[in-house]
Image: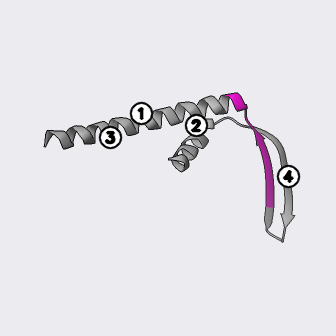
Amino acid sequence: MVAGSKNIIAQELGRVIPLVEIYKNVGSDNIQCDVQIAYDSKSAIEMAKKVIRKQLSDEAEELQDKLDNMLNL
C-alpha cells in the first residue's frame, strides 16, 4: 500500500519549484543534469493524507463487497 500511495502522491503533486539546475557535459554526446526541486510541505502532507484516505476508502468498499458476496452464498 505504501508503494502505491507514493506513486499516486508523486503524480498528484504536479507543480514543483525547481531551485537549482546543473548541466555537465559527460563524454562527447552525453549531458548530465542535476535538478533540485521544492514543494510546500504543508500542501504535500495534506495531499498525502487525501490520497491515502481515498485509497483506504476504496479498499474498504472492495472488502465490503467481497464480504457481502461471501455471506450471500
| Amino acid under disc 2 | Glu
Q: Place residue 8 in its image quadrant.
A: top right
In primary-sequence order, the first of circles 1 and 2 is: 2
- Taking 57 as reference, is 65 left or right? left
Could you give the CA–CA distance between mark 1 and mark 3, rounded to whole angstroms? 10 Å
Picture quadrant where residue 39 is located: top right
Q: Secondary structure at mark 1?
A: helix
Tell me whether the residue at label 4 lies in contact with that at label 3, contact meaning CB atoms closer than 8 angstroms.
no
Tell me which label, 4 or 2, sits earlier in the chain.
2
Q: Residues within 10 Å of mark 3 (few under 14, many from 20)?
A: few
Q: Which residue is mark 4?
A: 22
Q: Position of residue 24 (x, y in %)?
A: 86, 60
Disc with the residue nearer the chain's start (4 vs 3): 4
Residue numbers of the magenta segment: 32-42
Residue 65 placement (x, y as % from top left) = 27, 38
Q: Secondary structure at mark 2?
A: helix
Marks 1, 2: nearer the viewer: 1
Q: Earlier in the sequence, mark 1 or mark 4?
A: 4
Measured as percent of width and height from the top left, residue 60 is found at 37, 36
Provide the secondary structure element on which disc 3 rests: helix
- Pair 4/2: label in front: 2
Q: Is 70 in the magenta?
A: no
Residue wearing tag 1: 57
Does label 1 or label 3 sit earlier along the sequence? 1
Judging by the rendered image, the residue that carries numbered circle 3 is: 63
Q: Earlier in the sequence, mark 2 or mark 3?
A: 2
* Tag 1: amino acid: Ser
Render colour scheme: one colour
Helix, strand or loop for the magenta stretch, by majority: strand
